[in-house]
Image (cartoon, rainbow, N blue to C red):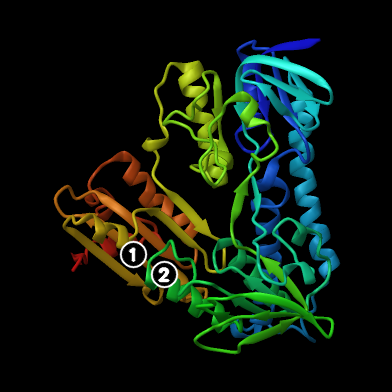
Amino acid sequence: MTTKYDAIIVGTGQAGPSLANRLTQQKMKTAIIERNLFGGTCVNVGCIPTKTLVASARAAYMARRAQEFGVLIDGSVKIDMKRVKARKDTVVRQSREGLTTWLKNMSNLKVYEGHGRFEGPHTIRVNGELLEADKIFINVGARAVVPDMPGLNQVDYFTNSSMMQVDFLPEHLIVVGGSYIGLEFAQMYRRFGSRVSVIQRGQRLIPRDDEDVSQAVKDILESEGIEVHLDATCIALEKKNNRVVAKNDCKQGPKEIAGSHLLLAVGRRPNTDDLGLDKAGIETDKRGYISVDDQLRTNVPGVWALGDVNGLSTFTHTSYNDYEIVAANLLDGDSRRVSDRILCYGLYIDPPLGRAGMTEKEVRESGRNALIGKMKMTRVGRATERSETQGFMKILIDSATKKILGAAILGIGGDEVIHSILDVMYADVPYTVIQRAVHIHPTVTELIPTMLGDLKPLE
């Protein structure tokens, strides 16, 4: 027997629940399927728990620096990792339970807890029941890549998901991977008190960003005692004397690094390998991501893919924007497209990095005439007041149109301040709009007009 719905949503990440709310408000009989934890990566093993841990790590860091601010703390600063984890678990549980309750009490929505697999273009089987709908939305997310690395089968290791269960302090954490996930964990555990070594296969950290940003991030991490090993052209692992030994062919530093624990942070892969996509005729690329058009439609009519699984929306905010795009086109008669959005993201080390638009490298490669402005955070009063002067701000302008092409803010409040630039980019107005704005003193944002007043040709 087949149960028919107007719409089926597979997965409860950032796009799925909000889309379910819109569909059911339109009186559409809707089913939503979740095989594991409601809320997906962000709520359970991504943004919310990691940033909660980052906050605990910052509290420890500032406590150790208290004397710089004239604050005296009797005795040493101690970290109770069980309490740290308990705080994180509480924040996650509140978010997940709130979402679960919302969905299970939503009118016109049937919640299925189980593993859904396609049996045809518009049929999905879950818990032995066959569901059918003209409209199906795939929001199943992604998971950590476990690489085919020599010796990995000999050692225990963590991924970003299994690290959520850690309630102790690793004596020496080895992090394989020098991008966003790896660096956030590296800094937080260093601040908790672990010795931390980062091994990066490439020539620099966060290779998607400009070289000056990569170098500044490396300087920040090394200033806190994190060991960074670059150019690890061959990484192999083994267990020796109850230790994890990472062998690497680095141009600088030791050939072997022996630690107590290992974290793999080398990328993500889509959760598409067990969905039965072949039975539905849904096309994927060579990495397994579902191929979609500019409105997130797959090659099968009536089937959409949202969030991490489409390879275009690898952040929580872009996944949510996928929901907005689909809802606008499907329900509101408002033509919205993926290509309308401006790339933006944050790196949540401390101080954070906020990024929007093109990098300097991309602007140079485009061949256009451009202007650049750059300012060290040492010139920002708010940073000086807080004794947090690491990093810099950078902005790129099209010489002909005067439009902002991109920006990076690595420094105190960078993840928030970047939005003042991003909003001007979305408004599609000249940079002079923000340059002539009067901002509040003392803030970080007030220096953006100053930076824009000192632009130079990008040579």
The residue singled out by tag 2 in the image is 213
Name the quadrant containing residue 188.
Answer: bottom right
Q: Nearer the viewer, mark 1 or mark 2?
A: 2
Q: Residue furthest left?
A: 400
Q: Amino acid at mark 1?
A: Lys
Residue drawn at (65%, 37%) of the image: 140
Q: Position of residue 399 (x, y in %)?
A: 16, 55
Question: In this image, 107 relative to 228: left or right?
Answer: right
Question: In this image, 85 relative to 443: left or right?
Answer: right
Q: Amino acid at mark 2?
A: Val
Question: In this image, 379 relative to 103: left or right?
Answer: left
- Which numbered disc flags the more N-terminal residue, 1 or 2? 2
Q: Nearer the viewer, residue 451 or 137?
A: 137
Q: Position of residue 46 (x, y in %)?
A: 66, 52
Location of residue 7 with respect to 356 vertically, above or below: above
The residue singled out by tag 1 in the image is 394
Residue drawn at (51%, 27%) of the image: 298
Secondary structure of residue under mark 2: helix
Location of residue 24 with respect to 163 vertically, above or below: above
Residue drawn at (70%, 68%) of the image: 263
Q: Nearer the viewer, residue 321 or 254?
A: 254
Question: In this image, 56 relative to 314: left or right?
Answer: right
